Amino acid sequence: MNKPHQSEVKGDWQAGDKLYKGKYSIEKKLGCGGFGVTYLARDKKSQSVVIKTLNQDIQFHPYFEKLRQDFFNEAIRLAKCSHHPHIVQIIELFEEQTLPCIVMEYIPGEDLAAWVEQKIMPQAEAIYYIRQIAQALDAVHQQGLLHRDVKPHNIMITSDRTKAVLIDFGIAREYQQDKSTNHTTFISEGYSPIEQHYSTEIQAAYTDVYSLAATLYFALTGESPANAQRRHYNLVEYKIDPLVAPQQLNPEISGQVNTAILKGMAVNPENRTQTIKAWLELLPEINHLPEINRKNHAYSSQITQTSLAIKPPLHKIPAPQPRRGYISSLRSYLAIGLLIPALIYFVINDDIYKNYISSISVKEQGLVYKNSEYGFSLKYARDWVLSAKESPDFTRTVAELVSPNSLNGYQGKIFIEVRDLKSSQSLAQVQQETIKDIQKWFANSEILENRETTLGGSKAYLLVYQGRDDIQSGVAHRHKLSSRMRVATVKNNREYALTYEADISDYALQKHSAQKIIDSFAWLN
């Protein structure tokens, strides 16, 4: 099947629409993520179900057919495990108006993130749910699968608070223990371990262990853990782990649980608990939810019940509102650096991790990159990774940002370049020179957009173009089709340029985020 034409867009179903020869009736849309959209529906017996299909944007994606097949594969992967009581049950798979549809059970309740945003969980209750999800993951692993996106948003808690259910198998993949396999890179900020940031690294059961331990961290503290890539960088460069021990955020956490979380979240996979079963042995045995905990959650009846909804999988869980007591006080201490002695120190093998990330100095202040030498700043989202170069190379790149996700392993980037002009050149002259360079060095190039814009309030040009990149990898020679958006201006006889580059199949995924970063460019004086 080919990618649909604009006139063939399907799937924007409204209340009352009938699917699968009238078997299902749409009630409302529940949520829309990066790839899928979910609807609440009823079958002919008036029983509630959830129907998931591909969203409208994906229908026009260059790799639509691959994504369509991936969607079917998700259904197959889910069917392997859906007999488990703590994994969302798949009812059937059908096709409607050329779109694949998965029918799943309706789970009345809220996801774990929503519950914790109301109130952090008592230790016994949190472990009760985490143990259920651990059992589900163990079943997944026994089928030779990894979930790869365990996080609070992907765990549903039923409205009666008796059961936790693992959902969204969209990026689950087959794996073989100790075998390096190319995996598509998808990152959930704070919950994805270091090996998941790189498509060629070995992923195994310990990958899901990290994510589950991080989820328990969130349930007991109300805080998302530090990003694994930043943890690794600080460990390599400074021998300091920026992850604050959960017991420091919540003194009611026992030493046993605190140790289990940290062991499960070890940055080095070799130091991490290797299997779900082994990690469970580190936790207290809690197989029944204490009745007192269920009675104490009066707020639970005030939360509007929803069903399983596919949420954007790559966004960071929003920071909970400040709470009274020790958590908000500790936030203040953290802001002024008084909790530095409470940070966890680990000494790791530099040789192992030097292969993961460059050890160049990263000049970043929160979410703001400032370059005093060239007099500009810009803002970027937490899921983009910044590398700032102390001295520009022949490409004139002073910094680059790497996007968090990719369909095929080639992550998008934003290159920030500063070039001293040989002579006094106008913006138009620089623009024409750039176009000539594109046509000369970028094989089969095509200019898709050429117009005036602004950068940091200064007059600028914008070029959108695509073409073929030649990639040399050892003795192999490969080609990659890329799309690029370049915005540049001239100031004080220098060209300042920001170029967003991505594989042609991934360009649209991060274009909006990249545009926001470029638009945030500002002069320091």
Image (cartoon, rainbow, N blue to C red):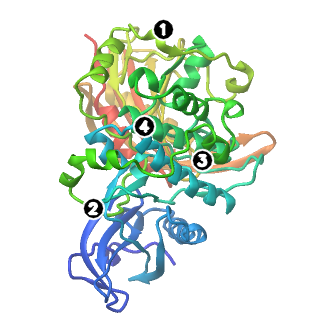
**Neighbours of disc 3 within 10 Å: few (<14), some (14-19), many (20+):** some
| Amino acid type at image mark 4 | Gln
User: Is residue 475 depicted above or below 51 in this figure?
Assistant: above
Query: Horizontal and vertical percent for residue 137?
Result: 58, 54
Q: Secondary structure at mark 4?
A: helix
In front here: 254 or 138? Answer: 254
Q: Earlier in the sequence, mark 3 or mark 1?
A: 1
- Left or right for 179, reference 456: right
Q: Residue at x 51, y 78 (%)?
A: 1
Quarter occupied by residue 99: bottom left
Residue receiving disc 4? 123
Circle 2 sits on which residue?
306
The first of marks 3 and 2 along the sequence is 2
Q: Which of the 4 image quadrants contains residue 469?
A: top right
Image point (28%, 33%), residue name = 519
Where does the image place residue 160, in percent across and percent down from the top left?
32, 59
Q: Nearer the viewer, residue 184 or 114?
A: 114
Image x and y of residue 344, in percent: 54, 17
Instruction: Tell me the mark number nearer the camera, choosing from 4 and 1.
Output: 4
| Between marks 3 and 2 in the image, the one whose residue lies nearer the viewer | 2
**Label 1 sits on residue:** 341
Q: CA distance from mark 2 to mark 1?
A: 42 Å
Q: Nearer the viewer, mark 4 or mark 2?
A: 4
Q: Which mark is residue 409?
A: 3
In front here: 507 or 133? 133
Kind of residue at badge 1 = Pro
Which class describes the residues within 10 Å of circle 1: few (<14), some (14-19), or many (20+)? few
From this view, report whether residue 269 is shown above or below residue 63: above
x then y, percent, for residue 176: 75, 54
Return the disc, 4 or 3, that comes first in the chain's sequence.
4
